[in-house]
Amino acid sequence: MEIKELADKIVEILDNKKGVDIELIPVSEKTVLADYFVICSGTSSTHIKALADEVEYMLKRDYDVTPDHIEGRESGRWILLDYKDVVVHVFHPEERANYNLEKLWAMKKVEE
C-alpha cells in the first residue's frame, strides 16, 4: 500500500466512525518523522478510544498493517498511532486546542 493511500484510508476510517475535524497534513518537507500526520478529534474519551481502535482494527483486517507504536491509550485524551510514514493523532478537543499541531506543522517551508 502506498503512503498517500494509507493516509487517505485512515481519514476514511475516522470519517466513517464520526471523527471530528479530520485533517491530513503533509509533513515530509518539514520533518523526517513521517510523510503525513492525520489529526482528528473525538467527542469523549470513549469516542477517542473507539476511533483509534477502529483505525487499528480496519488496517490490520484489510491490509495486514499494524502500528509500529501506540501512545496514550490509557488516558484516552490523546492517542497516537505510529504507522511510520503516517502518524495518527486522535485528540480530545481540549488537548487538540492546547497542542495545536495543525498550526505547528502547517508552518511554511523555511527558505535556505
Image (cartoon, grey):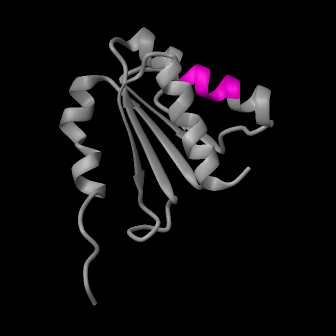
Residue at 25% x, 55% y: name it.
Answer: 104
Position of residue 88 relative to residue 57, above or below, is: below
Horizontal side of residue 89 vs 41, given as left or right:
right
Q: Which residues are magenta?
A: 52-58
Residue 100 position by quadrant: top left
Query: Whole-percent x and y of residue 32?
Result: 49, 68
Q: Is residue 4 magenta?
A: no
Based on the displayed image, in which of its 4 quarters is residue 62 positioned?
Answer: top right
Q: Residue at x 61, y 42 (%)?
A: 69
Tell me if 61 is positioned left or right of 98 in this view: right
Vertical order, 111 against 17 (above or below): below
Left or right of 50: which side holds 109? Answer: left
Q: Quadrant of residue 22?
A: top left
| Residue 71 in the image, given as x and y percentages of width and height | 50, 35
Q: Spot the residue most to the bottom.
A: 112
Q: Is any part of residue 83 visible from this angle?
A: no
Tell me: 30 left or right of 100: right
Residue 54 inside the magenta-drawn segment: yes
Viewer can see residue 94: yes
15 or 59: nearer the eye?
15
